[in-house]
């Protein structure tokens, strides 16, 4: 059944796309030489991908970026540097705590923080330059500067070199992303009170690090510094960390992080932050009110969410609406309320993730080229890159219950997976939720060392409406961690073999 649906889908897409390209080429054949078909404001994963895709589809495209380097938050101060530090700190932690179990012994292991930071910076600069190379290859015009709307088709750019130019376009895509956000009354100095950007560049390992917000950034950056020796306490307003995660997986995940010596203060709010002495003193209170307590820190990381970035963009000048969270509402074609102006990525509603921004970028460019684009926000995978990683796609058990859907759950612990045992890294599980009547997979949640890679089998399965039996009857290589996905699928509609 699943195979038939794949074939049907492909045919629909092909028939929708062909034909429209010809009419598009005609539409743009008369472009004047200084006017672009598409102007993208912002060179992050949303913007640079939209620009490349638009150029590949034959549109004359310019991308404006104020930072001086391409790749946006993700490449410069987000996904890439954080994953570099997560990997380096994991290597140190492994060398110190688990290599001996494999018969590999050192007389001493130490952290060279400047070298670790240099490795991170090398990864960042290599990748940002790589995107610049992709712009050249695809003939995307790159303007370095701060863009502001003069009209719905004209952008004034204060260039990094100090001049001003006006860039014109038939279609403008806003891809200005998101920015760090503090708490009311707390100033981020990026030294003692840091955002993720400061936490990626500390010059010393803090003795005590307090993390405000137990979401993606808090747990990833908290893990980095905990592995390097900081005493890390996470203060979270909600009753649980990563509130969007499947409850059962989250419970195991939290236990694992506690074993790694991270402390959690849940249902707790920060009332004030005092930096008048050498360290930082935080006054805390239960979320519902009650007795206050003091928590001391050398460094405080504020990771309580990010905010859409539309500062000084001139949206009010051309009448682009924003919602009460500052995001730009768009329709299914990424069009804002102003004709010719589109928005994608972190600046619009939806998950604030780099791969979602990229999907938006491709789909938006396809629409502008007269083709059909498509992004299903319900099937965007999420990964927390701790160790083990936690990855998910589709619905949690709580969501399925709330929808009143009858369902079955299949689980398989990594402890029973031969590859995980072989490498002595067997914490976690695979959990699959499928509709009871049809066996169609509704959600997959994985905690495993490489969950961020394993999840893609599940993403594909959900994308094509597969059943748990479809995965279970697919041959998986042995010994691999992916066999845990197959076994969990078997357990969903029948029984697992290896437990
Ligand atoms: C620490 C951290 C770790 C993260 N890790 C991950 C991860 O592992 N995986 C993941 O999927 N996501 C991760 N994210 C989220 C990810 O970075 C964002 O979802 C993604 O970057 C959004 O892409 P974007 O193109 O919409 O915006 P951005 O990447 O924010 O890019 C927008 C760009 O627009 C530029 N800009 C803004 N206004 C103007 C203007 N007026 N003129 C010119 N240029 C302008 C900005 O300088 C910026 O470069 C992480 C974020 C952080 C902070
Ligand atoms: N691996 C990844 O994909 C990855 C990594 C880092 C960041 N990101 C993205 O970046 C965005 C920002 O990350 P984030 O971790 O800042 O946000 P988040 O939304 O993931 O987590 C914020 C957490 O802070 C809590 N919180 C909010 N206000 C609080 C307060 N006053 N006191 C205590 N806790 C409070 C929330 O309940 C939530 O648990 C996320 O939307 C995420 O999608 C993704």
Image: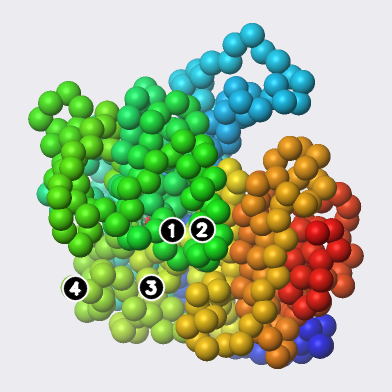
Q: Which residue in the protein does label 1 denote?
A: 242
Tell me, yes or no, if residue 338 can be seen here.
yes
Q: Disc 1 vs disc 2: Cβ atoms closer than 8 Å?
A: yes
Q: Earlier in the sequence, mark 1 or mark 3?
A: 1
Q: Which mark is residue 388?
A: none
Residue 412 image point, x, y percent: 72, 61
* Residue 431: percent from left, percent from top: 66, 65
Camera-side residue of 384 and 247: 247
Marks 3 and 2: which is nearer the front? Answer: 2
Residue 353 placement (x, y as % from top left): 48, 60
- Nearer the observer: mark 3 or 4; the answer is 3
How far apart in space, not on screen, are marks 3 and 4 (Cα)?
19 Å
- Location of residue 54 in the rendering, given as x and y in whole percent from the top left corner: 55, 69
Q: Which residue is mark 4?
A: 316
In front: label 1 or label 2: 2
Q: Which residue is mark 2?
A: 250
């Amino acid at each position: 059944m699943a195979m038939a649906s794949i074939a049907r889908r492909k045919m629909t897409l092909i028939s929708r796309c062909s034909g429209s390209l010809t009419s598009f080429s005609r539409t743009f054949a008369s472009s004047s030489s200084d006017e672009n078909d598409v102007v993208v404001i912002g060179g992050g994963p949303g913007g640079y991908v939209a620009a490349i895709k638009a150029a590949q589809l034959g549109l004359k495209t310019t991308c404006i970026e104020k930072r001086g380097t391409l790749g946006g938050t993700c490449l410069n101060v987000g996904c890439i540097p954080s994953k570099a530090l997560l990997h380096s700190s994991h290597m140190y932690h492994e060398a110190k705590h688990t290599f001996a179990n494999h018969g590999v012994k050192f007389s001493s292991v130490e952290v060279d923080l400047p070298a670790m930071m240099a490795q991170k910076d090398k990864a960042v600069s290599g990748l940002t330059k790589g995107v610049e190379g992709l712009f050249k290859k695809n003939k995307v015009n790159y303007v370095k500067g701060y863009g502001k709307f003069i009209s719905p088709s004209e952008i004034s750019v204060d260039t990094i070199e100090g001049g001003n130019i006006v860039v014109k376009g038939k279609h403008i895509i806003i891809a200005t992303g998101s920015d760090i956000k503090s708490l009311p009354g707390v100033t981020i100095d990026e030294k003692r009170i840091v955002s993720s950007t400061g936490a990626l560049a500390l010059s010393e390992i803090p003795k005590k690090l307090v993390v405000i917000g137990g979401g993606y950034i808090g747990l990833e950056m908290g893990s980095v510094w905990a592995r390097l020796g900081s005493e890390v306490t996470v203060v979270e307003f909600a009753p649980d960390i990563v509130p969007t995660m499947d409850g059962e997986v989250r419970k195991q995940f939290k236990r694992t992080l506690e074993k790694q010596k991270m402390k959690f203060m849940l249902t707790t709010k920060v009332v004030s932050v005092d930096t008048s002495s050498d360290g930082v003193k935080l006054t805390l209170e239960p979320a519902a009110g009650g007795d206050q307590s003091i928590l001391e820190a050398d460094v405080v990381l504020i990771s309580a969410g990010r905010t859409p970035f539309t500062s000084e963009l001139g949206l009010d000048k051309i009448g682009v609406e924003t919602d009460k969270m500052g995001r730009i509402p768009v329709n299914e074609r990424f069009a804002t309320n102003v004709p010719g102006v589109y928005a994608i990525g972190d600046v619009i509603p939806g998950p604030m993730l780099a791969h979602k921004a990229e999907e938006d970028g491709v789909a938006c460019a396809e629409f502008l080229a007269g083709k059909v684009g498509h992004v299903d926000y319900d099937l965007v995978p999420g990964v927390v890159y701790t160790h083990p990683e936690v990855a998910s796609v589709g619905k949690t058990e709580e969501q399925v219950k709330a929808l009143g859907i009858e369902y079955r759950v299949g689980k398989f612990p990594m402890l029973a997976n031969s590859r995980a045992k072989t490498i002595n890294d067997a914490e976690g599980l695979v959990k699959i939720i499928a509709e009871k009547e049809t066996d169609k997979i509704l959600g997959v949640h994985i905690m495993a060392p490489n969950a961020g890679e394993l999840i893609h089998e599940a993403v594909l399965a959900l994308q094509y409406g597969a059943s748990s039996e479809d995965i279970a009857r697919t041959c998986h290589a042995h010994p691999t961690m992916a066999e845990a996905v197959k076994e969990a699928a078997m357990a969903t509609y029948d029984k697992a073999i290896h437990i």
